[in-house]
Amino acid sequence: MKVVAYSVKPFEKEHLAKANQKKHDITLIFNSLSLETAVFAAGKQAVIVFSTDDLSAEVINKLAELGVKYITTRSAYTANIDRVAASIHGIKLANAPNELDIAGQTIRNLDMWEMNKCVGKACICAKACK
């Protein structure tokens, strides 16, 4: 799966790379997600975000326009995500409910979506995905 990860901190790079094991084509960027930086998601199926990224309806609309189908956050916090806007566009949402293995959960979310499966307890979609 082609993915872009926003707001990546230097210490996260190694954790994400180890968890990914070269399964997904992930572009890591330090920029936070905003309407202006959403263009980095062009050609990507998924985006990985953080709790400080802008996931307002306007940004989600732009991501959908660019072809994004999945958004996973490297956090248990999800109040920054407009779930209704994501639902309107059919974008699947997930978080990392287990704060002990954020990188691992993030990659598991991508793995499950790639297999066309629900991410289980990590699912934060506005509608049930089953």
Image (cartoon, rainbow, N blue to C red):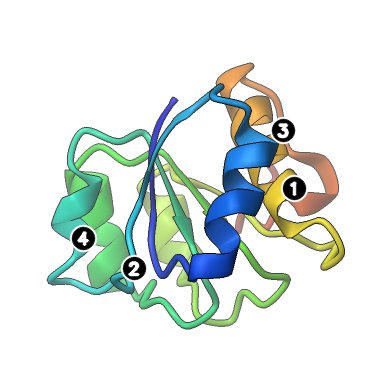
Residue 10: % across, % down: 49, 68
Provide the residue designation for mark 3. Answer: 118
- Quadrant, the N terminus: top left
Estimate the spatial distance between the alpha carbons at disc 1 and disc 3, rounded to whole Å.
13 Å
Q: Nearer the viewer, residue 127 or 119?
A: 119
Sequence-first tag of 2 and 3? 2
Provide the residue designation for mark 2. Answer: 30
**Dot 4: what SS?**
helix
Provide the residue designation for mark 4. Answer: 38
Sequence-first tag of 1 and 2? 2
Residue 46: % across, % down: 41, 41
Estimate the spatial distance between the alpha carbons at disc 4 and disc 2, rounded to whole Å.
13 Å
Q: Nearer the viewer, residue 122 or 83?
A: 122
The nearer-to-camera label among 2 and 3 is: 2
Provide the residue designation for mark 1. Answer: 105
Residue 96: % across, % down: 73, 59
Sequence-first tag of 1 and 4? 4
Corner quadrant of residue 79:
bottom right
Estimate the spatial distance between the alpha carbons at disc 1 and disc 2, rounded to whole Å.
20 Å
Estimate the spatial distance between the alpha carbons at disc 2 and disc 3, rounded to whole Å.
29 Å
Q: Nearer the viewer, residue 44 or 10?
A: 10
Q: Are marks 1 and 3 in contact (CB under 8 Å)?
A: no
- Quadrant, the C terminus: top right
Amino acid type of the residue that numbered disc 3 sits on in the rendered structure = Cys
Sequence-first tag of 1 and 3? 1
